[in-house]
Image: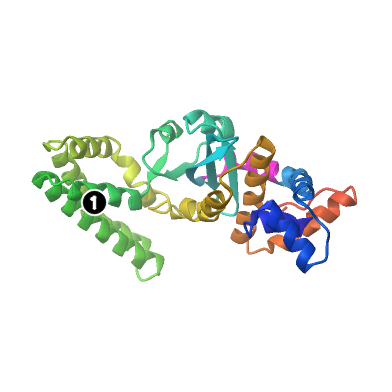
């Protein structure tokens, strides 16, 4: 059961190919219908593990959140990822609106979220906007063709390069945190001065971007005030890579049960990767515990 679930969820095989693999190579008779049955059984086995992680999310001090489009029953849906320090939780919902975040995190969450500039995150309060996304925004100014917008864009992009150089030195322990803060002082002043200048630009898109960034400039620098916070949302984007490839191969899910399998298995697989645990061994123990009428092992650190 664990191996069959991983063939579909981790190795991204269709139900038909999974059945063929089991029958042809392992001599285990299987058909697509049986693969679906096993999928549902494994979802039920590890769903308590998933729920335990989901309940823990609002208590986390820092989260990386990202989302990508998918399909459920041929309708548009969204796959969300919530990356904590030691675990990740995935969520499939029919909406990209803030209600999905409110329902999942609730009013108990008071941590900091690293994310892009999408407005559904704004109500969460404490944000760190991803500088990799901001670099793309500044490149768009350069590509606009407007001379004033290009001037602002080039200088902002240069400031981003400086920021990443200082951050790389800090990450590789070539400088202390105090030195990082000293180096970032001039960068911060330069960026905010350029953004303020950009609010007077004649190019409408550049003017709007600069105004939004300047008005919410504390969300650009939260990583300087909270140790352990990253200036990019790379953790969130990395966690979605496997899911995006799986979606492109499977074209989404046909029923809600399929979406529950996707979010549950992605959570288990990504969390095991974070914790350097063997996903197959963990799933095997979970299935064995279920068959013995025992509780599945936990993925919470220290549990």
Using the image as rendered, state which of residue 148 and residue 8 is in the foreground: 8
**Residue at 79% in and 49% down:** 34
Number of numbered labels in the structure image: 1
User: How many residues crowd around disc 1 within 10 Å: few (fewer than 14), some, or many (20 or more)?
Assistant: some
Up-down: is 136 above or below 182?
above
User: Which of the 4 image quadrants contains residue 202?
Assistant: top left
Q: Main secondary structure of the magenta part?
A: helix
Find disc 1 in the rendering and name its residue. Answer: 139
**Residue at 46% in and 52% down:** 237
Give the residues drawn in magenta, as a range.
Answer: 50-61
Q: Is residue 53 magenta?
A: yes
Q: Is residue 110 magenta?
A: no
Q: Position of residue 89 (x, y in %)?
A: 60, 46
- Furthest residue in direction bottom, as rendered: 174
Up-down: is 254 above or below 174?
above
Q: Position of residue 126 (x, y in %)?
A: 42, 38
User: Which of the 4 image quadrants contains residue 218?
Assistant: top left
Left/right of residue 164 with respect to residue 273 in the rendered view:
left
Describe the element under mark 1 as helix, strand or loop: helix
The answer to whether any part of residue 302 appears in the image is: no
Q: How is the image coloured?
A: rainbow
Q: Position of residue 260 (x, y in %)?
A: 67, 41
Using the image as rendered, state which of residue 239 and residue 158 is in the foreground: 239
Q: Position of residue 166 (x, y in %)?
A: 30, 63
């Amino acid at each position: 059961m664990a191996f069959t679930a991983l063939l579909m969820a981790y190795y991204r095989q269709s139900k038909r190919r999974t059945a063929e693999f089991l029958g042809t190579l392992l001599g285990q008779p299987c058909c697509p219908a049986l693969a679906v049955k096993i999928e549902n059984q494994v979802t039920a086995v590890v769903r308590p593990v998933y729920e335990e992680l989901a309940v823990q999310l609002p208590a986390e001090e820092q989260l990386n959140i990202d989302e990508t489009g998918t399909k459920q029953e041929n309708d548009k849906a969204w796959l969300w990822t919530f990356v904590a320090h030691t675990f990740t939780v995935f969520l499939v919902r029919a909406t990209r609106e803030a209600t999905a975040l409110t329902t999942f995190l609730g009013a108990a969450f008071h941590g900091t979220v690293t994310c892009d500039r999408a407005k559904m995150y704004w109500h969460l309060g404490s944000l760190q906007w991803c500088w990799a996304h901001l670099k793309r925004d500044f490149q768009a100014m350069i590509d606009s063709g407007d001379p004033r917008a290009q001037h602002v864009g080039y200088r902002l992009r240069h400031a981003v390069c400086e920021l990443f150089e200082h951050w790389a030195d800090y990450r590789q322990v070539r400088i202390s945190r105090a030195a990082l803060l000293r180096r970032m002082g001039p960068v911060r002043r330069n960026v905010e001065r350029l953004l303020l200048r950009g609010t007077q630009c004649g190019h409408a898109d550049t003017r709007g971007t600069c105004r939004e960034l300047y008005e919410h400039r504390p969300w650009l620098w939260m990583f300087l005030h909270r140790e352990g916070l990253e200036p990019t949302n790379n953790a969130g984007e990395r966690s979605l890579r496997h899911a995006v490839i799986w979606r492109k191969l499977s074209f989404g899910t046909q029923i809600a049960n399929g979406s529950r399998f996707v979010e549950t298995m992605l959570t288990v697989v990504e969390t095991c990767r974070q914790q350097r645990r063997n996903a197959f061994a963990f799933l095997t123990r979970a299935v064995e515990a279920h068959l013995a009428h025992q509780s599945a092992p936990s993925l919470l650190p220290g549990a």
